[in-house]
Image: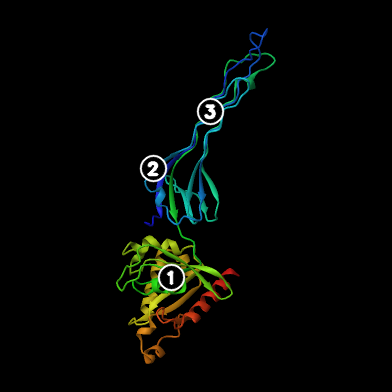
Amino acid sequence: MDFIDEVSFWVHGGKGGNGCVSFRREKYVPKGGPDGGDGGDGGSVIIRVNPNFSTLIDLRHRRRYRAGNGQGGKGKRMSGKKGKDIIIEVPQGTLIKDRETGAVLGDLTTPGQELIVAKGGKGGRGNAHFATSTWQTPDFAESGTEGESRYLYLELKILADVGLVGLPNAGKSTLLSSVSAARPKIADYPFTTLTPNLGIVQYGDFKSFVMADIPGLIEDAHAGKGLGDHFLKHIERTRVLVFVIEAISQNIYSVYKTLLRELELFNSSLLEKPRIIALSKIDLLSEYDRADLPSSLDGLTCCPFSAVTGDGLKLFLDSIIQKLSEAKK
């Protein structure tokens, strides 16, 4: 399935039904009092979270959503039926904005959460409402009002506890597949990962947590180079960031600084999140070279590991649990 995380479309609430002009008709009462019913309210357009959805792909091709109009009122004070609502289902983590003003209308993060994005118009009142002691046969009724209309922009930011960031081919996807049931595409060339991948990690007695792998970053990713700028938004909601750096890199510290810089230029608040440095692919190093790896960078402990052999994964996961516990407090 294609991963679509941005869509735009128009939404229109239904028009309210018109009130009815009617008079009671009974035997020996040729023209009784007014008994016109109210028009029904127009239907609304509602966006609802479906936890089984992971992409906005189902909304990609439709450009307008219009709720049903309310029915007109009838005689004998009978109100018209309300117009039918339209329910649009989206994944958790969907941000709803007004495309024309940029205003945020809602941030939907909870299963079943709903947001009315276009209210239906009000139904008009029938002439039964307008009778007075001096005017007992009003021959008019209210018209229904138009529903709301707006142009929406939907942006999906996936929900995860831990976000993996690193250069292309740093081993993020292999790591995700080794600690969870996720099976992202893995190969030994850059940009294998073209979309974010999520995996649920079960570890010891700790409650499971969600780990996200985004496409690799390169220098100037924040400015649109490569694929990173489009997907960096998907780590904005994470609680802990893991910098995955190849242990075989010529200058591990330089790679770390490059990643740090890209995050800062994209959104400086990302640097406020707890961080872990994970040194991948230690199975490609000799015992001598492993011993020469840095134990820390900028005061952060480095966690060397191999997703292939499993070496170091326990220490790595222990570090994540500790950071998640701290973040929760």
Q: Label 2: few (<14), some or many (≥20) within 10 Å?
A: few
Q: Position of residue 152 (x, y in %)?
A: 44, 45
User: Three-letter amino acid code at disc 2?
Assistant: Arg
**Residue sitting at x 59%, y 17%:** 22
Tell me the SS state at disc 1.
strand
The residue to which callout 3 is attached is 71
* Mark count: 3
- Point out the tag, 2 or 1, that comes first from the N-terminus: 2
Q: Label 3: few (<14), some or many (≥20) within 10 Å?
A: many
Question: What is the distance, in whole Å, between disc 3 and disc 2 at their CAs?
Answer: 25 Å
Residue 111 figure quarter: bottom right
Q: Label 1: few (<14), some or many (≥20) within 10 Å?
A: many
Residue 124 figure quarter: top right
User: Three-letter amino acid code at disc 1?
Assistant: Leu
Question: What is the distance, in whole Å, between disc 1 and disc 3 at their CAs?
Answer: 53 Å
C-beta proximity under 8 Å, tags 1 and 3: no
Q: Position of residue 161 (x, y in %)?
A: 51, 67
The residue to which callout 1 is attached is 164
**Residue sitting at x 47%, y 71%:** 180
Which residue extends farthest right?
133
Tell me the SS state at disc 3.
loop
The residue to which callout 2 is attached is 63
Of residue 195 and residue 100, the one placed in the foreground of this image is 195
Q: Position of residue 292 (x, y in %)?
A: 39, 89
